[in-house]
C-alpha cells in the first residue's frame, strides 16, 4: 500500500499538518507502535485482531464450506461486523458479487423480496454472530429457516454457522448439528474480516482467501515504529492530526466501483472504534468519480471540517474509448476509461489543494486478493493507531450495545433502564392537521 500525505500538509491545506509537527507526532507513533506490538504479543483483546493473518485457518474454513461449495448463491445472515467484512471482500473480488446476498437489516419488505428472488435449493446460508444474541440476525435466521421449510428445501444441509462458544445461535446450531466455525478470540466484529467471520462467502465464491491472508500478513510485517516508513501509520497519524486541527469528517472516496462497499466497512470501523469521549471523525461515504458530481462541491467549498481520503488501484482494466471522429470529443480520442478515472482522481486532489482543503491519497497495486488483504489490514492498523493517539477505548462499543439492549427489552416487555428511557424519550409532535 502507498500513502501520499502531500495534500494534507500545512503548506497546502487548512486544516493541515506541518512537517515539523509530523516529526513530533512520529515520536508518539513510536510509543503507540510499542503498545500495539505488546498487545499483539499477548493476544490482548482487540490487539489480537492484528494477528489474524497468521492465525486464521484457511483450511478449516474450506472444510466447513465443503458441503455447500457448489452453491450458486450465498445468503449471509448477520449485521455490522458480522456482515460487512464478507460483503466488502466479495464486492471487491468475487467474479460475480451478485451471488453474495446479505440480509443484515430486518426491513420486512426487503427480507420478503430478497427471499422470494432467491433459488433456495441452490443457496447456502451463512449465519454469523459473534455474540449469538443479536436480535436482527436471530430474527432473520428464523424467518429464513421458515421460508426454506415452506418451500420444502432442507436448510440444515445448506447452513454454515460462525459464532461464539455459547449463546442462542450456538444452541440453534447444536440442535441441528450444523457445521460451525469459531469467531476468533479477542477480536471485535469490525476487526474480523480476515477470519471465518469474513471469509466464508469469499471461500464459497472462489476468492483466493490464502492470498487475502498473505496480503494481510504483508501489511503486518510492514508495521514499524515510524510513520515515515509505515504507510498504515502515516494514514492514521495524519487523519488523527487533522482531526485535532478541525477535520471532524473523513470522507472516504474510493475510485473503483469494486471498493464502494469498502467505504461502508471503513465507516463502521472508524465510527464504532473512534467515536468516543466526545471525539472521533465522522466517516462519510463517497465514490469517485460519481460523487465528484455531487458531494465534491461541499468538500471543496463547505466548512473546513473535512479530510478527503481518496483510494485507487494502480492497475486498471483496459477499456478504450472509441474515437467518434468529433472535433469536440477529440480530447477523449485514444484514451481509455481507466485513464479517464485516474484523471478524475488527480483532478479531485488538485481541486481540493487549490482550495486549500486536505486530502490523503491511498493506492494499492491492483484490485486483487493480495492487495485487498493488505488494504483491509492496514486500515485496521491505522484505526488502532488513531485510538492510541486519541486515548480512546478502540475496541468497545458501549453506545451501540445500549441500543441493542433497549430493542431486546422492548420486544420482551421487560422493565429496564433502557426501556424506561425509550418510554420517556422526548417528543414534540407536529402534524398537518388532518
Ligand atoms: O456479531 P454480533 O454479535 O451479532 O454483532 C453484530 C454487530 O452488533 C453491534 O452492532 C456491534 O456494535 C457491532 O460491532 C457488531 O458487529
Image: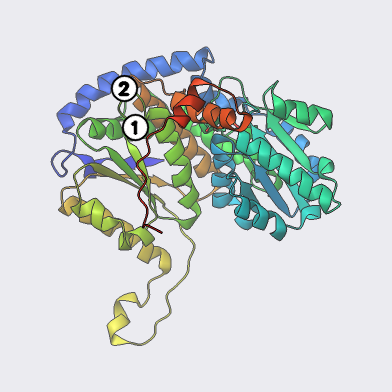
Q: Please tell me how crowded label 1 is: few (under 14), some (14-19), or many (20+) other residues with Cα within 10 Å.
A: many
Q: Which residue is found at the position 59% from the left and 30% from the top?
A: 408
Q: Dot 1: what SS?
A: helix
* Residue 273 seen by the camera: yes
Count of residue discs: 2
- Few, some or many residues within 10 Å of mark 2 (<14, 14–19, 20+): some
Q: In this image, 38 relative to 163: left or right?
A: left
Give the number of the disc on residue 236: 1
Horizontal side of residue 363 vs 134, given as left or right: left
The mark that comes first in sequence, 1 or 2, is 1
The Cα–Cα distance between marks 1 and 2, rounded to whole angstroms, is: 9 Å
Q: Position of residue 342 (x, y in %)?
A: 35, 59
- Whether 365 is drawn above or below 96: the answer is above
**Identity of the residue furthest to the left in this view:** 11
Query: At x 64% / y 51%, what residue is drawn?
Result: 111
The image position of residue 245, as x and y in percent, is 19, 33
Mark 2 element type = helix
Residue 389 badge: 2
Tell which of 400 and 245 is nearer to you: 400
Asked whether disc 1 touches disc 2, contact meaning CB atoms under 8 Å apart, the reply is yes
**Residue 342 — which label?**
none
How is the rendered protein coloured? Answer: rainbow
Q: Is mark 1 within 8 Å of ligand 1?
A: no
Q: Quadrant of the N terminus?
A: top left
> Would you say residue 225 is visible in this rendering?
no
What is the quadrant of the C terminus in the image? bottom left
* Above or below 252: residue 180: above
**Residue at the image point whose x is 50% and y is 51% from the top:** 367
- Residue 212 point in image, percent of width and height: 57, 39
Amino acid at each position: 500500500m502507498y500513502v501520499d500525505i502531500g495534500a494534507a500538509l500545512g503548506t497546502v491545506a487548512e486544516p493541515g499538518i506541518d512537517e515539523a509537527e509530523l516529526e513530533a507526532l512520529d515520536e508518539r507513533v513510536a510509543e503507540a507502535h510499542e503498545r500495539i506490538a505488546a498487545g499483539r504479543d499477548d493476544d490482548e483483546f482487540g490487539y489480537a485482531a492484528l494477528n489474524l493473518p497468521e492465525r486464521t485457518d484457511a483450511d478449516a474454513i474450506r472444510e466447513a464450506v465443503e458441503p455447500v461449495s457448489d452453491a450458486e448463491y450465498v445468503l449471509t445472515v448477520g449485521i455490522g461486523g458480522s456482515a460487512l467484512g464478507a460483503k466488502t471482500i466479495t464486492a471487491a473480488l468475487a467474479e460475480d458479487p451478485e451471488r453474495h446476498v446479505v440480509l443484515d437489516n430486518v426491513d420486512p419488505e426487503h427480507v420478503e423480496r430478497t427471499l422470494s428472488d432467491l433459488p433456495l435449493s441452490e443457496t447456502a446460508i451463512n449465519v454469523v454472530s459473534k455474540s449469538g444474541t443479536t436480535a436482527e440476525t436471530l430474527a432473520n435466521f428464523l424467518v429464513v429457516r421458515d421460508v426454506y421449510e415452506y418451500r420444502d428445501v432442507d436448510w440444515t444441509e445448506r447452513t454454515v454457522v460462525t459464532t461464539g462458544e455459547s449463546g442462542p445461535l450456538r444452541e440453534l446450531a447444536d440442535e441441528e448439528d450444523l457445521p460451525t466455525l469459531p469467531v476468533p478470540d479477542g477480536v471485535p466484529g469490525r476487526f474480523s474480516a480476515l477470519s471465518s467471520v469474513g471469509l466464508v462467502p469469499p471461500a464459497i465464491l472462489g476468492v483466493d482467501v490464502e492470498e487475502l491472508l498473505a496480503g494481510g500478513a504483508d501489511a503486518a510485517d510492514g508495521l514499524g515504529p515510524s510513520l515515515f516508513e509505515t504507510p498504515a501509520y502515516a494514514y492514521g497519524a495524519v487523519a488523527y492530526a487533522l482531526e485535532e486541527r478541525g477535520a471532524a469528517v473523513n470522507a472516504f472516496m474510493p475510485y473503483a466501483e469494486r471498493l464502494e462497499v469498502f467505504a461502508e466497512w471503513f465507516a463502521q470501523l472508524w465510527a464504532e472504534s473512534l467515536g468516543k469521549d466526545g471525539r472521533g471523525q465522522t466517516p462519510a461515504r463517497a465514490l469517485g468519480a460519481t460523487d465528484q458530481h455531487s458531494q465534491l462541491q461541499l468538500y471543496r467549498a463547505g466548512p473546513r471540517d473535512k479530510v478527503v481520503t481518496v483510494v485507487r488501484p494502480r492497475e486498471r482494466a483496459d477499456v478504450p474509448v472509441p474515437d467518434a471522429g468529433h472535433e469536440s470529443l477529440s480530447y477523449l480520442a485514444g484514451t481509455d476509461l481507466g485513464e479517464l478515472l485516474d484523471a478524475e482522481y488527480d483532478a479531485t486532489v488538485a481541486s481540493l489543494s487549490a482550495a486549500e482543503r486536505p486530502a490523503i491519497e491511498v493506492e494499492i497495486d491492483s484490485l486483487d486478493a493480495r492487495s485487498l488483504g493488505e488494504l483491509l489490514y492496514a486500515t485496521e492498523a491505522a484505526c488502532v493507531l488513531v485510538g492510541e493517539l486519541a486515548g480512546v477505548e478502540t475496541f468497545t462499543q458501549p453506545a451501540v450495545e445500549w441500543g441493542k439492549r433497549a430493542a431486546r427489552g422492548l420486544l420482551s416487555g421487560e422493565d429496564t433502564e433502557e426501556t424506561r428511557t425509550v418510554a420517556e424519550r422526548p417528543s414534540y409532535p407536529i402534524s398537518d392537521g388532518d
